[in-house]
Amino acid sequence: MAHVELSLSEVFAPSGETPTEPGLDNIGRWSATVSSAEEPCLLIDAETRVLAVSTAGCELLQLGAPEDVIGLPLLDGGLRLLDFTAYRGELAEPEIDKIPPLLALTSGRLARGLLRIESATEESADATVDAISTPVVADGAVAGSLTFFSEV
């Protein structure tokens, strides 16, 4: 005779931190969510300016404090990307367009890839992170991208 188990979980109710008001657009909702997230994540707009970044995201990407990079272009806000060669050279311009946060903007699709982040200090090692990005849509058009990071 077959054995079937059923388990019930509690109903998800949005916390007070997750805005649900109709006055906020999609970008505004994601911005509030990313700002308070415990996971390393980042939200940029269509011009690649950082709209929101979690504290864990700043630590992993070695960006300093969130308030130091919000409003700056992603690549001018302190994110130092390296290629994967033994030389550890700065990522070249054509390759920059292929990093997941920017690729999600231009393609309008999910993007995933590895990033090599230059160490902010001599004492620490470079970091390699897995980045998964999705376009964020507002008013029927791609208005930004949301990226989650995981250290490799």
Image: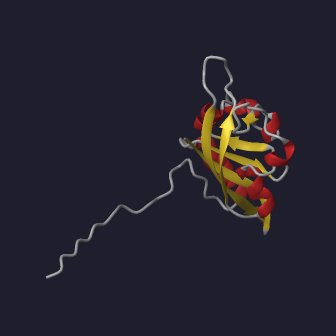
| Viewer-proximal residue among 113 and 26 | 113
Q: Is residue 17 left or right of residue 72?
A: left
| Residue 130 pos. (x, y %) | 60, 46
| Residue 30 pos. (x, y %) | 66, 53
Query: For the point 23% across and 71% down, which residue is it?
Result: 5
Say which quadrant the N terminus sits in: bottom left
Query: For the point 72% across and 54% down, which residue is it?
Result: 145
**Residue 48 in view (yes/no):** no
Query: For the point 74% across and 36% down, which residue is it?
Result: 81
Say which quadrant the C terminus sits in: top right
Above or below: residue 55 compared with residue 124: below
Q: Residue lying furthest front in this view? A: 86
| Residue 132 pos. (x, y %) | 63, 53
| Residue 36 pos. (x, y %) | 59, 42
| Viewer-proximal residue among 25 and 143 | 143
Q: Is residue 66 left or right of residue 48?
A: left
